[in-house]
Image (cartoon, grey):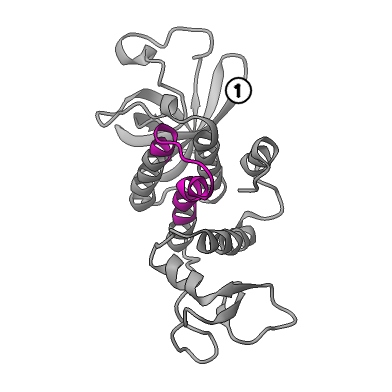
């Protein structure tokens, strides 16, 4: 794997002088690699010493080798499409970006073409940078930060093959009506009838239609979409809580 477009999702220490890095590669999805002997030493000449290397969110070009599930890093440099992202993400935007990284770390497949999600990831990060650069207050702040997250969650579920039925009632197959309420049954879809055994959420028809159309511009739609997508993701994330969600809750008293 030479000259692959990548970003770093997470890294941790390995032995005395190395790191294990979880990369997100456009053409291969989530790939883990050892960066040997880099702690406390110069990485070499030219771009190898750039401060953006080994930081999350930056667009990189990496070369990896090996035959096991854990590869090793041959070379890392800034992508030709590099733009400073990490330093521009601050406050809520930064924690939202870490939340997206943690979702990908938990759910992204390996050795799979993920260009669609890779490109969306970059768009969402740029949206979060805009949130930092043009702060707003009140309800508009909710729209500012959460709309990109809901869009990313929805598209990630679709990419993974777990897309949500948002437009048709499951018993009759008829179109969802904006002025009606539905019981959204996980892994099935919206129903006019409440069940006693399935996990479900009461939700407005207008929310389902807005979410399907990417129209996340009102508070009610965002609140209900957040509940729906949190339940949908929970079925695939398992019981282990997301660290970024807990941290955001502690800092801002808002559960992401």
The 10 Å Cα crowd at callout 1, few under 14, some 14 to 19, many 20 or more, is few
Residue 170 vs residue 175: left or right?
right
User: Magenta span has 147?
Assistant: yes
Measured as percent of width and height from the top left, residue 121 is found at: 40, 45
- Residue 64 is at least partly visible in this image: yes
* Residue matched to label 1: 13
Question: Range of the magenta residues?
Answer: 128-151
Residue 238 vs residue 97: left or right?
right
Measured as percent of width and height from the top left, residue 44 is found at: 37, 9
Q: Seen from this angle, which residue lies furthest left? A: 80
User: Magenta span has 216?
Assistant: no
Label 1 sits on a secondary structure element that is: strand
Q: Seen from this angle, which residue lies furthest front? A: 138
Residue 195 vs residue 224: left or right?
right
Q: In the rendered image, which quarter is residue 130 located in? A: top left
- Residue 1 is at least partly visible in this image: no
Viewer-closest of 163 and 94: 94
Measured as percent of width and height from the top left, residue 5 is found at: 32, 36
Measured as percent of width and height from the top left, residue 246 is found at: 68, 42
Residue in the image at 69% along x and 47% along y: 241
Viewer-closest of 161 and 217: 217
Q: In the rendered image, which quarter is residue 16 located in? A: top right
Quarter of the image with the N terminus is top left
Viewer-closest of 255 and 65: 255
The vertical placement of 26 against 57, above or below, is below
The vertical placement of 154 against 54, above or below, is below
Residue 196 vs residue 34: left or right?
right
Residue in the image at 37% along x and 36% along y: 6
What is the tally of numbered marks visible in this picture? 1
């Amino acid at each position: 794997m030479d000259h692959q477009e990548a970003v770093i999702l997470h890294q941790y220490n390995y032995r005395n002088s190395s790191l294990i890095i979880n990369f997100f590669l456009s053409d291969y999805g989530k790939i883990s690699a050892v960066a040997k002997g880099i702690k406390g030493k110069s990485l070499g000449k030219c771009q190898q010493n750039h401060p953006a290397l080994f930081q999350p969110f930056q667009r990189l070009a990496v070369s990896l080798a090996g035959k096991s599930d854990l590869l090793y890093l041959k070379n890392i440099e800034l992508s030709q499409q590099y733009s400073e992202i990490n330093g521009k993400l601050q406050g809520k935007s930064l924690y939202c970006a870490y939340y997206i990284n943690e979702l990908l770390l938990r759910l992204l497949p390996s050795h799979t073409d993920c260009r669609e999600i890779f490109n969306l990831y970059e768009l969402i990060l740029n949206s979060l940078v805009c949130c930092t650069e043009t702060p707003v207050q009140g309800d508009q702040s909710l729209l500012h930060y959460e709309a990109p997250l809901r869009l990313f969650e929805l598209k990630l579920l679709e990419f993974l093959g777990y897309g949500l039925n948002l437009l048709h009632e499951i018993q009759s197959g008829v179109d969802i009506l904006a002025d009606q309420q539905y019981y959204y049954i996980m892994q099935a879809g919206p129903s006019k009838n409440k069940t006693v055994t399935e996990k479900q959420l009461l939700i407005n028809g207008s929310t389902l239609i807005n979410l399907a159309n990417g129209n996340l511009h009102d508070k009610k739609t965002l609140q209900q979409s957040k509940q729906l997508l949190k339940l949908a993701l929970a079925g695939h994330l398992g019981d282990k809580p997301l660290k970024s969600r807990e941290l955001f809750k502690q800092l801002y008293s808002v559960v992401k």
